[in-house]
Every structure is written in C-alpha cells, then in structure tokens.
Image (cartoon, grey):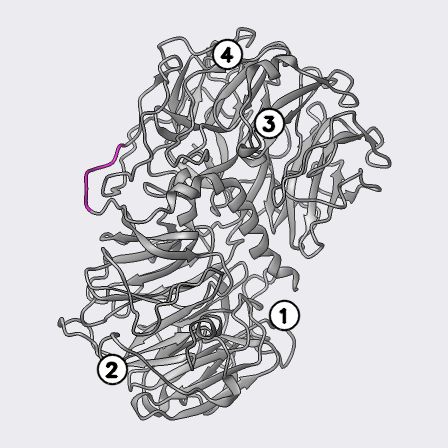
Amino acid sequence: MHTKNMTFLFKKQFFITISACLILSACGAGTSDFGTGSSSAGMAAIPAGAGSTPASTGSTPTGTGSTPTDTRSTPTGTDSTPTGTGSTPNNGSGDTSTGSTAATWTSVKWGGGGYVSGLIYHPTSPDVLYARTDIGGAYRWNQATSQWMPITDGLRFGQAESAFHYVESIALDPTNDQLVYLVGGNGGNGRLYTSSDRGNSWTWVSLPFMVNGNAAGRAIGERLRLDPTNPSTMFYGSRNAGLWKSADSGRTWAQVTGLSSLNMNTAAVGVEQIIFDNGNVGGGQTTWNMWAAVAPDYANAAGLTSTFYKSSNGGSSWTPVAVPTAVVGYYIPHFARAADGMYYVVFNKNAGPGGDGPGYLYKYSGLSGVWTLLSSTTAGGYGGVSVYGSGPTTRVALAVTNTWTDFPGQKITQLSDNAGSTWREIESQMPHTQTTSGYWGWNDDVEIDPNNRDHIMHLDGPGIWETMNASSATPSWTLKVTGIEETATLAVTTPPAGATYKLINSGGDIGTWVQTDLATMPTKGPTTGWTNGNSADMSWSDPQYIAAVATTNGSGGAGYGYWSGDGGATWANFATLPAGAAADGREASNIVVTARNKAIWAPSNAVPSYTTDNGASWTATNLPALTVFDGWTRAYRLAVDRKNPNKVYAYDSGGVWWSKTPGRVYVSTDGGHTFTLSQGSVSAGLRANPWQATSLAVNPNVEGDVWLADGDTVYHSVDSGATWTKLNNFASIFSNGNGAPDAQGASAVALGKAAVGAPYSAAIYVVGVINGQWGVWASDNAGSTWTRFNDDAHQFGGIGAMAADWNIYGRIYVNGTGRGLLYSN
C-alpha cells in the first residue's frame, strides 16, 4: 500500500470514531425537512441552573435551512489583564450573562490539504462550479473573489449531522443554475440535500440506501444524474443497492429493479454512474436512451453479465453491452458524452483513489455499438476524462492516476485535439506556480470548462490544479485551492501570552506545525511527509520548548515523538520511545510538558511514561493499565497545572460509552511520575465515553482549577481534583434507545484570555448541548451563565478539537469535520 492511501484509512477511522454515536440516529430513513418552517438564529444567554434535560426527542429538524443573520457585535476587551481568582466553584446558579459571541470566523491558512473528490460544472452558465470533498463538505467557486466558498458549514450540517459532510455526489439542474443537489453520508443511509440558491441554504430528505463519500472509488461518478430535458427525473448509482430513480426532484426514491434488485451487505463501489443520450436542455421530454456503468463488485454479486448497460425506455429495463475483452472486469471511473453522441469511456483495473492500472480509454459509438481503443497505459492508470466539441476535432482531456513525481516522459494529464487519435502531455515538465505541492498521484477527475476549452482543471491528493492556456505548447498550472481548507486537525494547543507563535496544529496527514501567522501556510514543522500529528505541548514557562507525538502513514500505526527547543524552527526526534508508543501511535496518543526536557507521554492503549532528559530515557508511571476495546483507540488524557507544574492530571474517560466503566481522574504532585486516584472523581460518576468525545483543561492563572468535559456534561474542580462540581445545564441528546447520543452534551472545553473586568480569570468555552441546542458555549463567570458563541451558519459539520487564545479575548480555534482549523473574531 502506498503511504498516500493512509489518507483514506486515517480519515475514516478518526471521523467514524469521533462521531460514531452521532451517526447511528442521524442516518435513519424516511424523514426530511423538505420545505417546512424556518430556522433559529441562535440562543440567548442561558443561566447555568436553567439547563434541564433537553426536551428534544431527536426527531427530524424542521426548517428550510436559510442562513441566519448574525447581528452580534464584536467582542471587546482584548488588551487588559484578566481579573478574578477563579477560586469559587459554581454548580449552575446565576442569571446574568457575560459571555461573548463570535462575530466572524476565518480559516487558519493551509490551502487544500485534503482530497477533493469531484468537480462539477454547470453545463451552460459560465463560472458556476462546485467541488465536493471526501470528508470536508462542498464548495462553490466565487468568480468575483477568485476563491472557493464553503456551502456546508451551516444549518443541516451540525454535530449530529457530521456524517453528511462526506459528499459522494453533486448534480446541477441544467435548466436552473440556482438549483443544486448534494448527496452525503459516511456508511449509513445517506441524505439528498437540495438548495435553490446555489448552496446558501438547504433542505434534505433521507435516502433508502447506503452512501459513503469517503470509501474506495469516491472520485467515481457523478453518481447522481438529472435528465437534461426533464430534470425532475433523476437517477442515483448506489454502492450496494443498485440503481435508484426519483421522478419528483428527489423527494421519493424507488429501486430500478430492471437492472438489479440486489442489496449487498458488504462494502462495494456499485453502480458507478449513468449518462443520458441527450445533448439538449429543458423542454420537459423524457430521455429514453441512457447508459450505465456498473463496478465489477456489484455486477458479480448481482449476476450481471457486463459492466456496461443500456436502457431504451427511460431506465425501466436494461440490457448488457459487451465491453472489449481487455477491460472485462474493470472499473469505469468516468465516461463522457461528446456533442456528436460519441462516448469516451475510461476503464481502469482499480477503483482508486489513485487507482493503479492498467488503464484504457475507448471511444464508443453509442447506438451502433462500436468500441475504438484510443489510449492505454501500464504506468499508472486512468482516472478521469472530459470532452469539448464534437467530430474529428473533439478535445479530450485524460487524467493519469498513480504516477508519482515528475520527470521527462512522465504522464500526468494528456490532451488530444483530434478525438483521441493522437495525444500530448500538457502537465509533466510544465511550469507550476507552487513547486512544494505535488500535482500527480490522485489525478482522479479532469474537467474542461464547458465555456472555455483552454481552461482545464484536475484533482490531485491535496487539492486542485488548473491551466488557462491548455492549447499552449507549454501550459502553465496554478494550484486552485484558495478558500478550501480540508485538513483534519486532531489537536490544537495555544501558548501563553507573548509567545513567538500563535498555536501548534497537530493534523491528520499533514503532521505537526507551529503557526506564527494565521494568514499564511506554516513553515515550522518537523516533517513535510505524510504523518498524523496527534498531540503537542509546550513548557508554559519556556514556550520555545515544544514536544509532540505522531505516527507516520504507512508505518502500521507506529508512534514516534520529537521536540524543538527554538519555537519550532528546528526539530529532532526523541532518542528513545516509551513502552507502548511504537506499537500504537493512533490519535489518542498525547503528550504534555512540565518544563524544558521534561514530558509525560500517554501512548494509545498504554500506560503513560515520563522523561526528565528530553527523551533519552522513559520511565513508566504507576497509572493502571487500560482495557483495550477492539477497534477503538483510548489513552489517558493528560493536562499540566501551569501554575504549579508539579501537578499533572490524567483522565481516563472509560474507553467507550457501552463499557459502563465510569471515567476517573488521577492526580500527580511530583511532575507526573506517580499518580493517585481522585476519589472525588469516582463520586462524581463521570460518564463513560470515547476518548475523542471528552476533554480536560486547567486554568493557568490559578493552581488546582480544573475543567472536565466527560462527553455528557461539564465538571469543575477548584481543589486540584479532590472534589468535582457538576454543571447542570449541559446534557447529551438521546433518542434512538441504544445508549448512543445524537449529540454529545459536552465534548470539548477550553480556557482563554478573560474579558475586561470579568469575575473569573479565564473565559471558558464548551462544545456541547444546552436545552437541546448544540453549539459552542461561552462563559465569563466561571460557568454561572452561558451564551452561545457560534450560530447556525457556523457549525462546520461538528467540532472536535478546540483551544482558546491567551492574547486575544474571544478568540478560539476549532476544527470542523474536514474543514481545517478556524478561528473566531
């Protein structure tokens, strides 16, 4: 397996883990919010004593999904020293609000960083273009600003709906360039989202079949197709349940049993796509002739005799079309219809992403049934094809997959101006604006602008490349990712006020990076290879010293660690590893620093160890061994008391919610060498939850002031964990009866700079649910009252990691589901 394939494995594991409990109820069929009601623009301040158990039953939300208007003012008081001692616990009383709200949100710059799985042009309206991603939702191109705009951040894409950020297909109504259809899902029954305003607002219906936008072959398609002359009729090629049809713009669906009635119980690529044999737009007439591509996994299971089928009666019945002998049993990742009715069909041995070959491109004459070989390769494979024009001068662009690096003779993007008779390479050895990013490998889709034949774009692993002068002898290429942020942040850490950097971002696939400027791509990191950065921390008294832990993609999950003594300018690996680190370096692995050269490392599913010599040696702590739950990563979650770094807290969340093992907190007073169980945490009855659904934070201004989110609610200790006070207003939403929440009541807690004159020495932020409303909640008075910090328009498919800034009041950093890292203003 090439290391690049770890992108799929990692993202699937992490996001299923963090949202598994949420997806179980969100994927039900037969419910919708199609055309009903209106949405809330947020909630007022909530007294902490008023938060009784949410009344929500988990039923389908109502509302048309219109984007709410945020009228809240920008937080003030960003310069003064925090006030208050933070010494008084609060169990949820009080009736005034001092919490701030976010006025705007901005992405921390990376630029791409994730897999864009498809590009979708409107066939007639210039510059109407969409991009779908495997885990990070969808984007619309804004020609006026020359950047991509996220269209799945808001209502209908919250924490309990994070599964639908995994976009499997997009279709545009050819008769109405405002009308967009989007299909999302992550392994359960999917949803069809509909927007009548180019993605500014959405309604949805549940689909009666499985959807997975992050599975094998996820660039194949488009699976969703609209009849160009009668677009209220649409078809969907599903992964394991055959072909489906809707005759009412997607409101209801029926399986097309004329192809097959099989519903597979295993993962598959399935029916890949259909194309209507019709070059017209509008008029209301049904298109009778159409073609379908079927992956060999579904064809074999269903007893079909070919991977290519034809219908002459509007999709009611289908007959097999024999494919050339050389490509029997191959996938058809893309095929395209030229204006003259000729079809250009890609066959590839493997489904991708980045599927290896052999690959073949054939021209198919349609109703006359003649196949003509145009190109083949055994160096890599073929992923995408796009056509422009007709007849002998048809322009054909061909994407070559699984070819790595660039050298003379390499094939990346091929172009023909004579309907495939001859070819030339238009990308290898050509000028590229950014040489630090590869433009090869996962070239799984290529598109010729239907309004400009010289404008060609294609995918690669971390983004999109385009040329505006494809006809040139030396086309120039530009990375087209401005506005797309699809990294998967696993942890984010902020330093004390006055440090030389803003934050440390530990991300899936991209590794660990020290961010000194939020508006530019970071350059300070230990490696540019494909690694998962799991955790990082700094010495609070000496923030130039940083320690981090990670795993290298392709290593089988082995962990390793590294350190920097100069704020991230230079790095070195730890000389040795603690017990358990090499065996399991998954994302629960975390590290904390008590002082320069002194750290405690909690590997996944292992007992933490400490070092006092910068990793030259490690000694196991006395913490109990953890019960391992198959397929789940867990670890002790560590936090250092910044006021007294001899105190270190270790939180065991119980592993998984069905373990029925309450969470526990252990406290060390000797720098993390030995720990004692907090009996107060036992008495508190912390709920068992997965590691990723819990959080621990310590107020650096006051010794012994600890905050804990157990996945269900928030607890506060002001005596170094000896006793814990439960805040009564946070509570998970349950509706499905199996013990899994629809949305976690409190999954992340972070502390940052206090407001001017605030009674508590830190601003507190919690990702969770109050009175049935999920969001980020803020308090300036030690949890006496809470204000919703985000709004319906800024939900980002759910939020996992969060940290607050110690320089600027009201600034937090959050990750969305495949939406990179964002910060509040």
Would you say the magenta stretch is mainly helix, strand or loop?
Answer: loop
Distance from the alpha carbon under mark 1 to that under mark 2: 42 Å
Judged by depth in the image, the label closer to the viewer, 4 or 2, is 2
- Identify the image quadrant of the C terminus: top left
Could you tell me if residue 436 is visible in this image?
A: no
Disc with the residue nearer the chain's start (4 vs 2) = 2
Magenta-drawn stretch contains 37: yes
Distance from the alpha carbon under mark 4 to that under mark 3: 33 Å
Disc with the residue nearer the chain's start (1 vs 2) = 2
Residue bearing the label numbered 1: 404
Q: Decide: marks 1, 2 in contact (CB < 8 A)? A: no
Seen from the viewer's position, the closer of residues 146 and 83 is 83
Seen from the viewer's position, the closer of residues 102 and 378 is 378
Q: Amino acid at mark 1?
A: Trp
Distance from the alpha carbon under mark 4 to that under mark 2: 72 Å
Judged by depth in the image, the label closer to the viewer, 4 or 3, is 3
State how many labels appear. Answer: 4
- How many neighbours does mark 3 have within 10 angstroms: few (below 14), some (14-19), or many (20 or more)? some
Q: Which mark is residue 312?
A: 2
> What's the residue at 49%, 50% (across, down)?
486
Residue bearing the label numbered 4: 760
Highlighted magenta segment, given as a residue range: 35-40
> What's the residue at 40%, 56% (across, down)?
210
Residue 700 appears left or right of 184: right
Q: Amino acid at mark 4?
A: Tyr
Q: Amino acid at mark 2?
A: Ser
Q: Answer above or below: position of 671 versus 17.
A: above
User: Secondary structure under badge 3?
Assistant: loop
Seen from the viewer's position, the closer of residues 759 and 158 is 158
